[in-house]
Each structure stands twice: as structure tokens, then as C-alpha cells.
Image (tube, coloured by chain):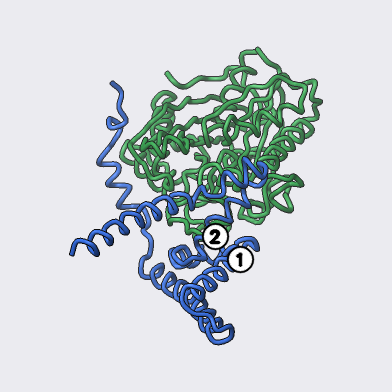
């Protein structure tokens, strides 16, 4: 069994989200709590800017939950940079425990799963879960310099400059009901520009396992939200689930595919560890609080490659963790 | 033994190939031709200018024109314009000598945040490096062939 049920229903007490100029002018921009005027957030480097974003959302989510930092037992955070420096360096400023986690762009639901389990078991009273990503720092690490004049292939995605964090604890709020832990799935995709295709099989595996183990069907949910499969990856996931006998097309959304205003311009949409956290902590959390969505399955998806593994010819393994959130 | 070959799922990869969007080649080729041609025309314009106005010729003229075009490529990279040209033109702005300048200057700007030695200087040739290595190596090879043909026949 890869699905765990949280009997004490840990709650999401509050959230906070931040986005860069491109994200805040996108389709979901008006829901994002803090709108960055430029993508440096007052820092001198993009890495420091990403750290600043994550620090800000952690701090604000604690404030939004009407808590003090002393009330927080642990921060569970991660990001895409080497040695998850954004998470570590933002945790440095808080007087709280810190667990650094990494599952590429699936880090957010990984953090939520761990946080919910710790709170549910009564081991910790309240934790903050957060992730971030920054277009310019990710581009530097995984691809080319920003000023290099090269074109992006049509299947490429755009790393989201943004971060989101939420406070988990016991109290009023939307409840985390259960979580399905993903497994690493690799179908042999080697194209580093086609992350959606690399991650879709892992997403399909987690979703299928979730339905089989819980006995639920897609109708149970008001929304099934994947992290950053993009437009192409979303189609692939719907196809794969159809083959397995589940029609998810009516309730399915992808954070990456809806985050920007113009799909075509950024090709397949957004990606990155901050994509699902920023979109969930702004738009979907609001919908849950207003009860226009009641049952939501959030499934962040990650491509577990490094620039070294790609250069050595390894294919791209994917992962996806699903968390069921009910209002 | 575990081998990454085991993970290849042929059916899935064929399916992905069929649903993935393709590059619109007629569009990208036309844009590359347009911008690449334009850059070469600008170079040719400088060539005429230096030939008639300064009276240069031969290698001196070629070096002068190259220097100006490299400067322009580097300058536009510094202004943040060249990557926009590149986004539109694709290969059209990579192939001319201005593209080479862009590939040296862009990492130099980007990695300046890690300092002048370990950042700027060390990362400067991260993209142009392979071009230089294989360019020099192939020029040696062609030189040897040329020498062989010239002396033997």
C-alpha cells in the first residue's frame, strides 16, 4: 500500500504565495498574494532572489495563520537548485526545525505528505511546507545563459518564478485527508525539453494506484490537479489514464498549463518546483476555502534528472505524489 | 545488473513522437535566412565602407570587418537585444560571427555573480569552447591534407 490515511485530518491553516512579473500578469496572477515588481526581488543574484521569495512566503504564511515563529516546530522545504540552497538558506533565518526535501518539481506534495504525517501522528504541532523556483536560476543551472540567442523547441516549458508555502496544524481549515506516495517511473524519454512526456507515466502510475487503493473514481473529486505536466503532458496523462480505464478529462487541470496567459508563447506552459506550490497556495486554496471546490487531489510531478545524468545519456525518471485535500 | 536500457518503452516513445509538436521548418528556415542574410549584408556594407573610405584591402580589411561585427554582437548581447533576435531568427543569428561573440559574452555576463576569476573568466568559454577546440583541430587536419596534396601531387 502506498496510500496513507490521516485519521486526525491535519489542516492547512494558511498559505502564502509570491510570483514574478510574468506570473502575476498571467491567468492566475490576481490570486497571487505577493506580486514581485521585478524578478530580482531586491537581491543582487537570481539565487538570492529565489531564497528571498521562499523566505517571504514562509514568513507570510506563518503571519497569515496568526502564529509566531516560536509556534512552528519545523519547516519542510525544497527547491530545484543544487543542494537545495534556496530552502536551506531561507530556513537559516528562522528559529525552527528544518527538513530539506527534494523530488524536483514534485517536492511540494512530498513536503505536504511528510508534514501531514508528522502533524497527524502528533509528533509535531505545526509545520510549514514550501517550495520555490526561479526561471533565471534554473535556466543557469540546467540550460543556457539568459542572453544567449537560441530558440526553444515547441515542446519546451518555462520555469515559474514563484514560491508558495502553507502552514499545517490542528485547527480550522481545509483538511488533508490522505496521500499516495509516488514511485520512480521511467519510460526511457531522453529529451530534456520534453519534461511533460517524461513525467506523465509516473503521474499515471500514482493516480491509478490512488484510485485502486482508495476505491475512489475520478468522480469523487471536484478537481484533479497535476503540477507541471504542461499542455502536451496533460494530454498524455489523460490518454494513459483512459487506457487504464479511468476518464479524468472532466475534472483534470494542470498548474503549468494554466499559469500563463498565452499558452502558445511559452509553448507547453510553466514548470518548476514553485509552479504547483504557487498555483495551489493562491488559486486552488482560495477555491477550497470558498468551498467552490470541495475535494481536490493535488499531484505535483517531478522529473528527477540532473544536467550530469542527461549528458551521460541517462533517460529521465519521473515521480508524482498525490495529496487529497478536502474543505 | 541494472541498466538504463531496461527502461526503454518503445510503444510509449513512439506514441510521444506522434503527439509532440514539431518545429515548423518552413517558418524557421525563412526567418534564419532573412536575419542571417541581413547580418551578412551589414558585414558586407562595412566591408565596402572600409575599402573605399579607409583604403583597406586583403586580410587587413577582413580583420577589420570581423572586429566590428564581433563588437556589435557583443554590444547587442550586453544590451540584452541579441537573445531576442536569436529567439526570432534561430540559426540565422547563431551561425554568423556575431553569434560567436554572443556565445562568449552571454556566459561572461551571467556568471559574473560568482566573481571575475571563478565566474566570468572560467565560464566565458563554456559554450564557445567546443567550437574553438574542434575548429582548431579540424583546421590542423585540413592543413595536413592540404599540405599532403600540395607536396605529393
Is residue A292 visible from the viewing direction of this image?
Answer: no
Q: What element carries label 1?
A: helix
- The quarter of the rendered structure image containing the N terminus of chain A is top left
Q: In the image, residue A175 lies at what x, y percent?
A: 62, 27
Identity of the residue drawn at 69% across and 47% down: A32
The residue that mark 2 highlights is B102
Q: Do the residues labelled 2 and 1 touch (CB within 8 Å)?
A: yes
Q: In the image, residue A92 lies at what x, y percent?
A: 73, 26
The residue that mark 1 highlights is B76
Give A293 or A281, whichever is nearer the viewer. Answer: A281
Quarter of image, res A282? top right
Q: In the image, residue A170 lies at what x, y percent?
A: 70, 21
Q: In the current view of this chain or complex, which residue is farthest to the left?
A: B153
Q: Which chain is blue?
A: B
Q: Which chain carries label 1?
A: B
Identity of the residue drawn at 58% across and 43% down: B122
Q: Is residue B125 left or right of residue A43?
A: left
**Which tag, 2 or 1, sits closer to the chain's start?**
1
Give A21 or B54, whichever is nearer the viewer. Answer: B54
Amino acid at each position: 500500500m502506498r496510500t496513507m490515511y490521516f485519521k486526525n485530518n491535519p489542516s492547512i491553516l494558511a498559505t502564502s504565495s509570491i510570483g514574478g512579473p510574468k506570473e502575476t500578469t498571467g491567468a492566475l496572477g490576481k490570486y497571487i498574494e505577493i506580486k514581485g515588481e521585478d524578478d530580482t526581488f531586491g537581491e543582487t543574484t537570481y539565487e538570492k532572489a529565489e531564497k528571498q521569495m521562499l523566505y517571504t512566503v514562509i514568513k507570510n504564511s506563518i503571519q497569515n495563520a496568526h502564529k509566531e515563529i516560536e509556534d512552528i516546530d519545523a519547516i519542510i522545504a525544497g527547491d530545484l537548485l543544487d543542494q537545495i540552497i534556496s530552502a536551506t538558506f531561507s530556513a537559516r533565518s528562522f528559529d525552527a526545525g528544518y527538513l530539506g526535501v527534494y523530488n524536483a518539481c514534485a517536492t511540494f506534495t512530498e513536503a505536504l505528505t511528510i508534514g501531514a504525517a508528522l502533524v497527524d501522528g502528533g509528533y509535531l504541532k505545526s509545520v510549514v511546507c514550501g517550495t520555490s523556483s526561479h526561471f533565471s536560476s534554473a535556466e543557469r543551472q540546467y540550460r543556457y545563459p539568459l542572453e544567449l540567442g537560441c530558440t526553444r523547441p515547441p515542446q519546451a516549458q518555462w520555469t515559474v518564478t514563484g514560491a508558495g508555502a502553507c502552514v499545517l496544524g490542528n485547527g480550522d481549515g481545509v483538511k488533508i485527508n490522505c496521500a499516495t506516495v509516488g514511485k520512480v517511473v521511467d519510460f526511457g524519454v531522453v529529451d530534456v525539453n520534453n519534461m511533460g512526456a517524461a513525467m506523465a507515466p509516473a503521474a499515471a502510475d500514482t493516480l491509478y494506484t490512488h484510485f485502486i487503493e482508495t476505491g475512489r473514481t475520478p468522480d469523487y473529486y471536484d478537481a484533479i490537479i497535476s503540477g507541471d505536466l504542461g499542455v502536451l503532458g496533460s494530454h498524455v496523462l489523460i490518454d494513459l489514464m483512459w487506457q487504464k480505464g479511468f476518464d479524468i478529462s472532466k475534472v483534470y487541470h494542470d498548474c503549468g498549463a494554466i499559469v500563463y496567459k498565452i499558452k502558445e508563447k511559452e509553448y507547453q506552459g510553466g514548470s518548476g518546483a514553485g509552479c504547483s506550490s504557487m498555483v495551489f497556495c493562491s488559486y486552488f486554496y482560495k477555491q477550497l476555502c470558498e468551498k467552490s471546490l470541495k475535494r481536490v487531489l493535488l499531484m505535483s510531478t517531478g522529473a528527477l534528472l540532473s544536467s550530469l545524468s542527461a549528458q551521460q545519456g541517462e533517460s529521465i525518471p519521473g515521480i508524482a505524489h498525490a495529496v487529497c485535500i478536502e474543505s | 545488473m541494472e541498466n538504463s536500457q531496461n527502461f526503454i518503452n518503445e510503444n510509449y516513445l513512439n506514441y510521444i513522437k506522434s503527439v509532440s509538436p514539431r518545429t515548423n521548418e518552413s517558418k524557421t528556415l525563412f526567418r534564419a535566412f532573412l536575419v542571417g542574410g541581413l547580418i551578412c549584408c551589414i558585414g558586407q556594407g562595412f566591408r565596402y565602407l572600409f575599402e573605399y573610405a579607409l583604403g583597406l584591402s586583403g586580410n587587413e580589411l577582413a580583420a577589420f570587418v570581423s572586429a566590428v561585427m564581433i563588437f556589435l554582437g557583443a554590444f547587442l548581447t550586453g544590451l540584452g537585444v541579441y537573445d531576442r533576435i536569436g529567439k526570432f531568427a534561430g540559426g540565422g543569428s547563431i551561425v554568423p560571427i556575431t553569434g560567436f561573440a554572443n556565445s562568449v559574452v552571454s556566459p561572461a555576463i551571467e556568471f559574473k555573480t560568482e566573481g571575475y576569476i571563478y565566474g566570468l573568466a572560467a565560464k566565458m568559454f563554456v559554450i564557445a569552447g567546443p567550437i574553438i577546440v574542434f575548429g582548431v583541430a579540424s583546421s590542423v587536419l585540413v592543413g595536413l591534407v592540404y599540405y599532403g596534396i600540395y607536396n605529393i601531387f
